[in-house]
Image (cartoon, rainbow, N blue to C red):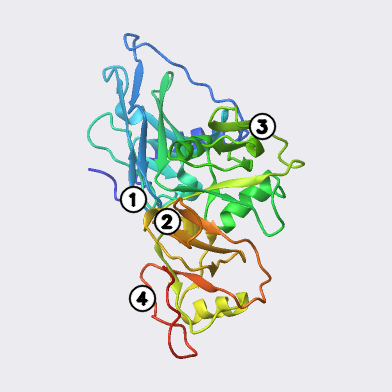
Amino acid sequence: MRPQSPWAAGPAALLLLAGILGSEALQSPRGRKKVVHVMEGDSGAVVVQTAPGKVVTHRGGTIILPCRYHYDVSAHDPAEIRLKWTKVTEPMAFVDVFVALGEARRAFGPYRGRTALQEDGAGDASLIIRNVTLQDYGRYECEVTNELEDDTGVVKLDLEGVIFPYHPRLGRYTLNFHEAQQACLEQDGILASHDQLHQAWLEGMDWCNAGWLEDGSVQYPISRPREECGRKDTPVGVRNYGYRHKESEHYDAFCFTSNLNGKVYFLKTFRKLSYPEAVQACKNNGAAVAKVGQLYAAWKLQLLDRCEAGWLEDGSIRYPIVNPRARCGGREPGVRNLGFPDKKYKLFGVYCFKKAGDAPPEKAAAGGGGTHPNRV
């Protein structure tokens, strides 16, 4: 029977676990991790198996990172087996996620309250992650130790979502790496990985401005070579500037976001709005002005299609097109960007975001009669 409490373990097991955790807490977050791989025929050997490829979920979902292990049960008591999950943040840097020894369990940092072992029979070290966040994306190591020997396996967690290029009101190529990280977070995203950008390129993404990725590299995807984007005679692909100086060099950002815990909608109003009026109109409707990442997620994952320019939270004007048509800005689907006008201009509508569980959006904002029609 599994313990009701995550720390429902005997004193000896708790002391041993505390000693292990205490020694690891002294390691630098970039410290080198020693892994001893052993052959299956060796006495007392531990062999870890993880699923090839990757597991895929979405923000807010629940996912199992599969991991099973085998060892000589005659040589070691099952209570002496330590299971540890870590996330690989850089090539030789790790963040603790979850550890178990006997019946003792402990989760770390943002994984507290969201992780547990699946424990589906002997040798199952699979980790359950609930309410998956954007930051959970990445590579995880499952390590199993029987006092003297250990083995590890790697599981890659991927998210369904959408890439969006981003630059702030200040203009293009104004963000260092840390500012790019912050800009993505403020627009409901994170810096994208190379794998995510490559997948977006395979799906047809073409963007002529270089942007930061989460590993500190600067890249951009080209599907239609042209003179202004590195000459016509260069091949298609994801162009790579390599790893750049994170403080002194400035580029745009490629952000990634996943599904929404809510709904983005165009708020019908009786007249065009300035930015302060747009903020108040969404607030009166029990919502907030949508962020750029939220609009991209609504376009990609909820198929929001609206040929109506509206304010977003960062002061930009955009609108989402799923089915391209005349007078809606181009022949390709996408989120159209009209830039950052003066916030006093009363020339636009507004896109609002309402969290799931809130009251449904009203048909019109308070303060007038009639609605503004949708142009199609």
Mark 2–mark 1 Cα distance, whole angstroms, equals 55 Å
Residue 243 - label: 3
- Ranked by sequence position, the earlier of labels 2 and 1 is 1
* Secondary structure at numbered mark 2: loop
- Residue 276 seen in this snapshot: yes
Per the model, the C-alpha gap separating discs 2 and 3 is 37 Å
Callout 3 environment at 10 Å: few (<14), some (14 to 19), or many (20+)? few
Residue indicated by mark 4: 360
Mark earlier in primary sequence (1, 4): 1
| Residue at x-position 36% and y-position 41% | 56
Do the residues bearing badges 1 and 4 touch, measured as CB atoms within 8 Å? no
Sequence order check: which comes first, mark 2 or mark 4?
Answer: 2
Select label 2 or label 4 by which is in front. Answer: 2
The correct choice, above or below, for 136 with respect to 74 in the image is: below
Res. 216 in view: no
**Mark 3 or 4 closer to N-term?**
3
Numbered disc 1: secondary structure: loop
Residue denoted by label 2? 324
In space, the residues marked 1 and 4 are separated at their CA atoms by 40 Å
**Mark 3 → mark 4, Cα distance in angstroms:** 46 Å
Mark 2 and 3 residues: CB-CB less than 8 Å, in contact? no
Give whichever of 329, 284 is nearer the camera: 329
Residue pushed farthest right? 248
